[in-house]
Amino acid sequence: MAPATAGRAYSTAFRSPNPPVPATVTSPVHSRLNPQQRRAAEHPPADGPLLVVAGAGSGKTLTLAARLAWLVQQGADPHRVLLLTFSRRAAAEMARRAGRLLHETLRLPSNTAPPTLPWCGTFHSVGARLLREEAPRLGLARGFTVLDRADAQDLLALTRQTLGLAESERRFPMAPTCLAIHSRAVNTRQPLHELLLATYPWCREHETKLQRLFSAFTEAKLQQQSLDFDDLLLAWWHLMQTPALAERLGARFDHVLVDEVQDINQLQADLLLALAGRGCKLTAVGDDAQSIYAFRGADVRHILAFPQRFEPPARVVTLERNYRSTPQILNASNAVIALAAERFDKQLWTERAAGCKPRLITVEDEAAQARGVADAVLAQREAGLALKRQAVLFRAAHHSAVLELELVRRGVPFVKFGGLRFLEAAHVKDVLAVLRWADNPHSKLAALRAARLVPGMGPASVRRLLDHGGPLTAFKPPSAAAAPWRMLTSLLEHLRSEAAAWPDDLARVVAWYQPHLERLHDDARVRLADLGQLVHIAAGHASRERFVTELTLAPPEASSDEAGPPHRDEDYLILSTIHSAKGQEWNAVHVLHVVDGCMPSDLATGSAAEIEEERRLLYVAMTRARDELSLWVPQRFHVTQQRALGGRHLYALRSRFIPESLLAHFEVLQPEASEPEARCMGAGPPLLDLAAALRGAWP
Ligand code: ATP
Ligand code: MG
């Protein structure tokens, strides 16, 4: 969080009177914008960069989309506009919104499609695309592999072992910690020495060895023509530091539009600055109260320092009218964020008609929470609110487990965002490894994964394969593996040949993989269905490379096997982690586990800064709701603690972010007094002496 001085900077820089609104109404879209929004949407690019900073639901994303439409109307080429967002989902939503506004603004006939926006994506996906296109000029193979976090960790662990750091030093940090340090150093651009002192003091003594590990790790990645997520940004930045390449890149884009700019890290901030330095006109929108990615090196100070990083400073427009939520939801959310230790005051107001107060519902346990949410969701659907307009949000992916079972039991279709990902599943990784190996013969990780699938290829043969430098056909597998090995090599030959065709390639790989899947997994049927889904997704991607890269960067979430993935036009409930719900809105929102230990997460009870980030997470969750908001407080430990308190209900577990003083903003609902009592252990004589009954089975 920003220090107090940043607060002063904010109040002077961001409170400056907004300049007058242009007189002309340019299009039906723009006539719907309020004066501040229009000022931002129609900010003349020649006047320098623009920052819109405003609270949740004030129309930042809409204004960014409207600005794009306005720029195109003024003659900008949509193919030369770079639109950066933070998730693939947000990028798709932005492309959809902007496309619609463009259509309207340009007054295109209804049967024509709006102009496409080829450069709308996340920082990482845009970075990967640029690097692929520039690969020949960077000494990089075009087919380079993007390593996901798990792959990067495997490779780092391998390097750690090779250097002898694993055995000789019992206290040397484990691979996940090493990767976290590496990633933070890259993204915050902090020298390792400083970073260790500030954030990982217990690893300080290992600085020299960590340095050695990281340089060997980089070497290993380069040898294998592989880049991890952090490398994508870092390599892009290096590209921008090389005049000839920076010029090519600068000449590619006229405008750069960034949503959710509060969550950028130092490296991303430097990238934006470098693009602006090459003549790209910059617009950024964000909300400091919604900064929730500090754990990945994001820093809210970037948004505050943004205007001053330009000469003359960027123009700042503030938006103060909230269009999303009822006054009751807005007041409760504002009250929660008002308790933040450091905050930048924003007076959000709304003209929306009054609704009901948000509900704060205490229930006995998780099961009661799941039943309560399912009841409420179904009741809303009965009342005419489609499932898609309702969402259930939670801090950690596993918080929804009990609810998922309840929904499956009741046949309520749902889609979960931010949960178990396809890529984490072994069978999907296996199939992708073959595609990756086909694209990048240097990738030892891919080779290792694919070769291990061949029956008869033991660890020694796989090792021999990894050390084998020549063409694959020259490799002699053990005789037991000869036939299945031949099938794999001819598949690879096909994939690397002119005859390869997308998305047929993937179907071929799946066909090759199926017998191995059946041999290796008991639940082959379910896994095969996942692969069917993968083939389906593949059809939406232009090429094999694009598919593999996109999937690695932002894998689609696996849906519940039992419920079956709902079809696009079907109605389904949204389940999402709060992080994945950023920027979205629903008419009715339920937030699960609003209890200490979940919010704030017990993983984050360390520093004050972490606690503040957890508070902002609750704020993000609450501000997703338009009309109805329910916060659930399951009392999980009522049995023993209630007895200690003489049988009274225990409300102490409610999140500390909603103290007594805020209760007036909520309709507070408690469980029936008698119900938990009746279920309490020891509330009366046991109905069954289970121990005796069980012992009776073994007299
Ligand atoms: P967040 O901080 O959550 O990302 P945001 O500031 O980006 O929110 P938007 O998602 O752009 O806000 O807008 C919130 C809602 O308000 C949307 O439903 C949007 O259509 C609506 N809205 C925004 N501006 C206007 C306007 N001028 N007139 C009518 N509706 C508006
Ligand atoms: Mg938004």
Image (tube, helix red, strand yellow):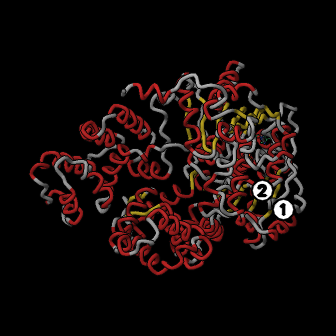
Outermost residue, front side? 699
> Is 373 left, or right, of 541 in this rendering?
right
Q: Position of residue 324 (x, y in %)?
A: 78, 39
Residue depicted at 25% across the width and 48% down the height: 453
Q: Looking at the picture, tell me which residue is in the foreground, 396 or 501.
A: 396
Q: 10 Å neighbourhood of mark 1: few (<14), some, or many (≥20)?
A: many
Q: Measured from the top left, where is residue 213 in percent x and y?
A: 42, 74
Judge left or right: residue 282 versus residue 123: right
- Residue at 65% from the left image edge and 27% from the top image edge: 679
Q: Dividing the image into four equal quarters, which quarter contains ligand 1?
A: top right
Q: Residue at x 88, y 63 (%)?
A: 16
Q: Position of residue 403 (x, y in %)?
A: 58, 32
Specify the amino acid type for callout 1: Phe
Q: Residue furthest top?
A: 382
Q: Which residue is mark 1?
A: 14
Is the residue 257 above or below the residue 491 in the image? below
Residue 185: x and y in percent read 55, 71
Residue 43: assigned label: none
Tag 1 secondary structure: helix
Image quarter of residue 669? top right
Residue at the (47%, 39%) spot, across then down: 558
Which label number is shown at residue 53?
2
Q: Amino acid at mark 2?
A: Val
| Whether label 2 touches label 1, CB < 8 Å | yes
Q: Nearer the viewer, residue 14 or 294?
A: 294
